[in-house]
Amino acid sequence: MSSPLKMRQSLSELENEFAKEISLERRRRASLRHSARQRTLKREAQKRHKRGSVRFVLLVLTLIMTAVIVTVVMFRTLYLLLG
């Protein structure tokens, strides 16, 4: 009589272990999804920052070139008017 009871207990223990494993696996997958999402967000933020820096440099260069061109044109015009 103790054999079937022992067998039921073993099956019950197996089922409990299986349920624990499933629970751990779900948590592990959720953790992996979370860390993957965090990495993606971090990469996107780095790309945004890099693009912003490039745009800023282009803006500064454009302003400098505009100032240089306006100065050159102004002095040539002044030279033509006074010359």
Image (cartoon, grey):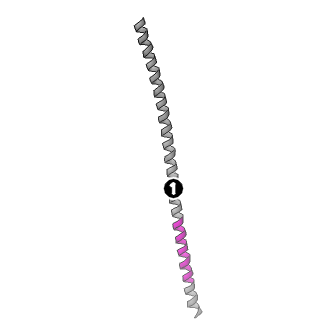
Q: Position of residue 3 (x, y in %)?
A: 58, 90
> In which quadrant of the rendered image does the C terminus lie?
top left
Q: Position of residue 57 (x, y in %)?
A: 50, 32
Q: Residue at x 42, y 6 (%)?
A: 82
Main SS, magenta residues: helix
Q: Residue at x 51, y 55 (%)?
A: 36
Q: Position of residue 55 (x, y in %)?
A: 47, 35
The answer to if 1 sits in the magenta stretch is no
Residue range corresponding to the magenta coloring: 10-27
- Residue 80 vs 45, above or below: the answer is above
Q: Amino acid at mark 1?
A: Ala
Considering every residue shown, the one lying at the far top of the view is: 83
- Residue 22 vs 52, above or below: the answer is below
Residue 11 left/right relative to 80? right
Q: Residue at x 53, y 61 (%)?
A: 31
Q: Position of residue 46 (x, y in %)?
A: 52, 44
Q: Residue at x 50, y 59 (%)?
A: 33
- The residue that mark 1 highlights is 36
User: Dot 1: few (<14), some (14–19), or many (≥20) neighbours within 10 Å?
Assistant: few
Of helix, strand and loop, which one carries label 1?
helix
Count the marks: 1
> In which quadrant of the rendered image does the N terminus lie?
bottom right
Q: Nearer the viewer, residue 18 or 55?
A: 55
The answer to if 13 sits in the magenta stretch is yes
- Residue 29 vs 62, above or below: the answer is below
